[in-house]
Amino acid sequence: MLRLLPSNADSPVLVWAWIRFWCCFQMFLNTVLVVLTDLAARLLGNKLFRQHFHLLLSAVLVFGPALSLWVSHHSIFAKRSHFLYRLFLRSGWGWTCVFVGSFVFLLSYSIRRSVLHSLRHLSRLAVAGGLWLCFCTLLDLLENTTGSCYEPLSTGPEVTGGQPLLVLKEGESKSECLKAGMVWRGYEVSEDVFLLCLCCLLLAEETSVFGPYLRLGGVSDAPLRILFLLCVLLLGLWIFLLLCLLAYFPQFPTQLLGGALGCLSWRGLYQGWYRMGPSWYCPGRPGQGLLNMKTSSAGAEDTLNHNHYN
């Protein structure tokens, strides 16, 4: 009993010490979150970054395949079965919609407190998703129409240079050809590169509004900052996966066409249609009708309306 008394007497002190430690740890995490999000928002909201990000992405598409001369083809990223490809690349649009949609909805609803207004801003994702599905359908139709089925000859004297010869099989559809274990060759455009480029440009557009929002003193609690940081991390992941595809699986003509299609889709939406202003047929640009609620000055209103491409 005498030995237990000191420990019982010290227990309130230990509890108080743990509480103080936990409070200090939370303050440290909050400080790190604020610093990281402020830096990322300043970068994504920078005028030069917004104006030239698509040029940076185009340079990656053009010169990215040259990385295949230096990367090791024994790397784990040289296998299509890598978990990053299976987990993120095959459902890239879903990940983008979840994170960007949550961020856009929370930001718009915290300012206007209107579900309809938030849904109008979310409609940009629906439009981009519909455009992506339409292009994927057209690209599949193009490949099916222009393609032919070939049977590889893997044995025999016909094999030259380690590559099997292909024998044309007429009358086969793409699905029947692939089910039979044969090869389908057609006019192909990389859907993976198209999706990654479109998602990167969409993420850069939708998150760039957070910088002006913070500069106007907008409420930035932890959930909003965490969602913004997750969107930034997702943007970095898409760029990394794009570099991996270009370096480890170079298909220069098809990948370049896919990237060009993604850039054209972004330009037609965000620099074309959405600049017409919010109406029943146009959702408007990111931040339009939201951030100008913070100020009434003409100069700040131009900034908040995201008019940086003139």
Image: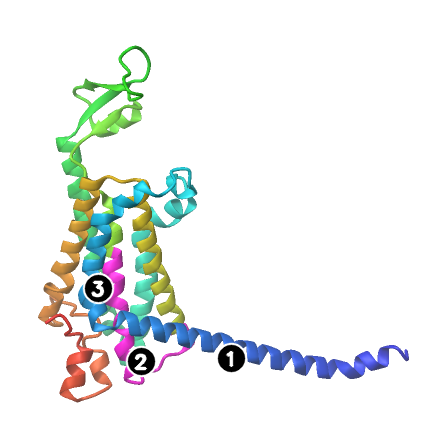
Q: Tell me the element at label 2.
A: helix
- Res. 160 visible in picture: yes
Type of amino acid at the residue the image marks with label 1: Met
Type of amino acid at the residue the image marks with label 3: Ser
- Along the horizontal axis of the image, is 102 left or right of 19? left
Label 2 Cα crowd, 10 Å radius (few <14 / some 14-19 / many 20+): some
- Along the horizontal axis of the image, is 65 left or right of 227? left
Residue 17 vertical position relative to residue 105 in the rendered view, above or below: below
Place of residue 160 in the rendered image (x, y in percent of width and height, measured from the top left): 27, 17
Residue occupying image coordinates x 37% and y 62%: 233
- Res. 129 visible in picture: no
Stretch of the chain drawn in magenta: 199-224
Residue designated by label 2: 214
Residue designated by label 3: 123
Place of residue 281 in the rendered image (x, y in percent of width and height, measured from the top left): 11, 66
Number of disc labels: 3
Residue 89 vertical position relative to residue 199 in the rendered view, above or below: above
- Along the horizontal axis of the image, is 196 left or right of 51? right
First in sequence: mark 2 vs mark 1: 1
User: In the image as oriented, which residue stretches furthest toward the right?
Assistant: 2
Label 3 Cα crowd, 10 Å radius (few <14 / some 14-19 / many 20+): some
Which quadrant holds residue 272? Answer: bottom left
Foreground pick, 210 / 105: 210
Examine the structure image and report whether residue 163 is included in the region drawn in magenta.
no
Q: Tell me the element at label 1.
A: helix
Residue designated by label 1: 27
Type of amino acid at the residue the image marks with label 2: Leu
Residue 56 vertical position relative to residue 35 in the rendered view, above or below: above
Examine the structure image and report whether residue 214 is included in the region drawn in magenta.
yes
User: In the image as oriented, which residue stretches furthest toward the top?
Assistant: 157
